[in-house]
Image: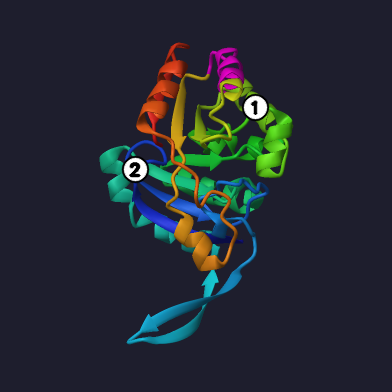
Amino acid sequence: MKGTIFDIKRFAVHDGPGIRTTVFLKGCPLQCWWCHNPEGISPQLEKFQKEITLDGKVFKTEEIIGREISVDALMEEIIKDKVFFEESGGGVTFSGGEPLMQAGFLLQVLKKCKAENLHTVVDTSGYGKQEDLKAILPYTDLFLFDLKLMDPTAHKNFTGVDNQQILANLDFLIQQKAQVIVRFPVVPRINDTKENLSAMKKFISARKELKEIHLLPFHNMAKSKYERFGLHDNFQDIELITHFDIEAISEYFMKEVLQVKIGG
């Protein structure tokens, strides 16, 4: 069985506990305005023209984003870092894109990881089939679950989908006693409003099983990607959220006796 990935990041320290290898699966059903991995949205391999300037001359080359890989070949890549997992309490994280878009491939790799006694994390938008979540649940030690906007209309406006299925899937994982950490990508003027923060706090506080939230401040590090791939960047000139503002949001959630972490 083969899947499509667009990156493997080694020695990651923001995608779950310990030192991790993060596998980025290609394809995402959301179209978030602030996406920092735009090359991961399309599930297909993509060709781009790349310009290189050397000694004043411009050379054009073709760049292919994404590659197909078998379950066994991917496991060979992951196992290379096993010693670092064991020393640090780390493991492997599956991100994207949206990993649930390749649920069958994800399931097979997760099974192989657990056979190697590796700690597994799935970083998800929560938008996918509940049956796929149920299938991967026995092989996933931790879900990093994004909550972006609580209002369904606003969620659809800024991500392309409403949040009904997302919230239902989060409740499903809670009911199944899965380990879940909520991740909140804080985007200036989009979801850092009093209304959204209040709604999110109310939603989380009603679910006592949720003990931890990670605040992910928006950054513009993906600006070069949008330029490189000729994509429209909705936030190329946006003012970044300040340290003061993110600390204030952190304190706001802490009042619910939540463990708050800034960053992944």
Residue 193: give x, y in percent of width and height: 56, 26
Which quadrant does the C terminus fall into? top left
Q: Is residue 25 magenta?
A: no
Residue interval drawn in magenta: 197-209
Looking at the image, which is closer to me, 186 or 233? 233
Q: Secondary structure at mark 1?
A: loop
Q: Quadrant of residue 206?
A: top right
Q: Is residue 197 above or below residue 128?
A: above
Q: Judge whether 154 appears above or below 112 on screen.
A: above
* Dots 2, 1 in contact, CB < 8 A: no
Quadrant of res 172: top right
Q: Which residue is mark 1?
A: 150
Q: Residues within 10 Å of mark 2 (few under 14, many from 20)?
A: some
**Magenta stretch, overall SS:** helix
**Any part of residue 143 in sight:** no
- Which mark lies nearer to you, 2 or 1? 1
- Left or right of 168 in this view: 238: left
Disc 1: CA contacts within 10 A as few (<14), some (14-19) or many (>=20): many
Quadrant holding the N terminus = bottom right
Identify the mark at residue 128; answer none if there is no mark. Answer: none
Q: Which circle marks residue 13 in the picture? A: 2
Q: Amino acid at mark 2?
A: Val
In the depicted view, which residue is nearer to us: 247 or 113?
247
